[in-house]
Amino acid sequence: MSVASDMWPPFARTQIASNVIVLTTSHPQPKECAFLFVTRVLGGVLDGEEYTHTAANEALAMHCALAEWCRAGLDLDKAS
């Protein structure tokens, strides 16, 4: 994995381009919330975007949306 700073295994990982990755990781939490899911973009025009969710389905939906946004950003770069 190219992201050495992440201690937790990926819940979802999408390689958009050689320098753009959408990564969602799950982090165990206290009893009130079984997991915290963090979705982030590494590289590209959305580099640094980060969202947190407590439900896996919400995290996966955001992961897919960010992947599409990153692809759209790449398409815009190619068009210019």
Image: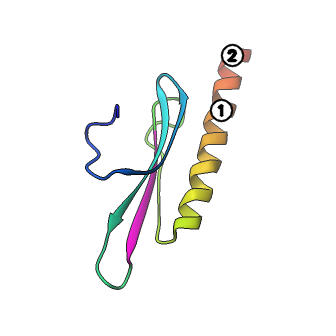
Count of numbered badges drawn on the protein: 2
Q: Residue 42: which quarter of the image?
A: top left
Q: Which residue is mark 2?
A: 78
**SS for tag 2?**
helix
Q: In percent of the image, x 53 and y 37: which residue is there?
A: 46
Q: Are marks 1 and 2 in contact (CB under 8 Å)?
A: no
Identify which residue, 51 or 30, lies in the foreground: 30
Q: Which residues are magenta?
A: 34-41
Which residue in the rendered view is the most extreme toward the right?
A: 79
Amino acid type, callout 1: Arg
2 relative to 7 in the view: left or right: right
- Closest to the camera, between mark 1 and mark 2, is 1
Q: Which residue is mark 1?
A: 71
Crowd rating for badge 2 (residues with CA inside 10 Å; few <14, some 14–19, many 20+): few
Crowd rating for badge 1 (residues with CA inside 10 Å; few <14, some 14–19, many 20+): some
In 3D space, how far apart are the residues under numbered discs 1 and 2 (Cα atoms)? 11 Å
Q: Is residue 33 magenta?
A: no
| Sequence-first disc among 1 and 2 | 1
Could you say where residue 74 lies in the image, as x and y percent from the top left? 64, 25
**SS for tag 1?**
helix
Could you say where residue 57 lies in the image, as x and y percent from the top left? 58, 66
Dominant secondary structure of the residues highlighted in magenta in the image = strand
Decide: is 45 above or below 29.
above
Q: In percent of the image, x 60 and y 41: which residue is there?
A: 67
